[in-house]
Amino acid sequence: MVVKWSMNSPRMLELRRHGCWAVALLALTLGCKAQVETTRVLGQVTYKDRPIAGGVVNFFPAAGGRPLAGVIDTEGQYQIDLPAGDYAVAVQSSPKYPAGFKEGDPLPPPDPHAVPARYSLQKKSGLTATILKQEEPQTVDFALK
């Protein structure tokens, strides 16, 4: 027995209506990710009381997950939005680019005199930060020795 359904039959209209609801529900479910509340964190990174001119501050969540990074500007300042929690921190300085460096050239290693290598390793840096859940920015400075 072959059943032919018309696109306008009551059964097809019902299936299309349910299909539209299913697609709408799926779109809402996929489009509504839980938003994580963050705190703006800003600070300065210094080594021997002098600002580090460029680099990255890496925040490794103690609870696990991917690290988050804030870029250090030429004045040693950084800012980043972080969820509240405890973090292990590592600092990496920018490399010094040789004269004539152009895009596509191999990157030089970080400047060994800007920051000692131990600060670039999460487990050896000894740097930590506790970020509080708050609306106003939190200052977290790192004075490396």
Image (spheres, rainbow, N blue to C red):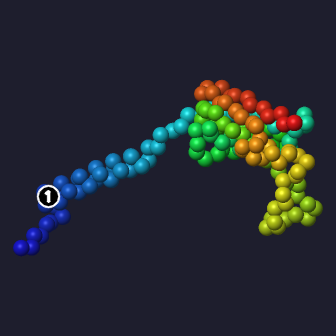
Observer-nearest of 81 and 50: 50
Residue 35, placed above or below residue 108: above
> Disc 1 marks which amino acid?
Arg
Q: Quadrant of residue 143?
A: top right
Which residue is rendered at x = 78% and y = 32% of the image?
141
Q: Quadrant of residue 127?
A: top right
**Label 1: which residue?**
11
Which residue is rendered at x = 39% and y = 46% of the image?
29
Observer-nearest of 47 and 54: 47
Q: Is residue 70 visible?
A: no
Neighbor class of circle 1 (other Cα within 10 Å; few <14, some 14-19, many 20+) is few
Give the quarter of the figure containing the N terminus.
bottom left
Which residue in the rendered view is the most extreme toward the right? 99
Which residue is rendered at x = 84% and y = 65% of the image?
102
Give the side of residue 26 with respect to residue 53, left or right: left
Give the side of residue 109 with respect to residue 41, left or right: right
Residue 140, image x and y in percent? 74, 31
Residue 108, image x and y in percent? 85, 60
Give the side of residue 98 with respect to residue 126, left or right: right
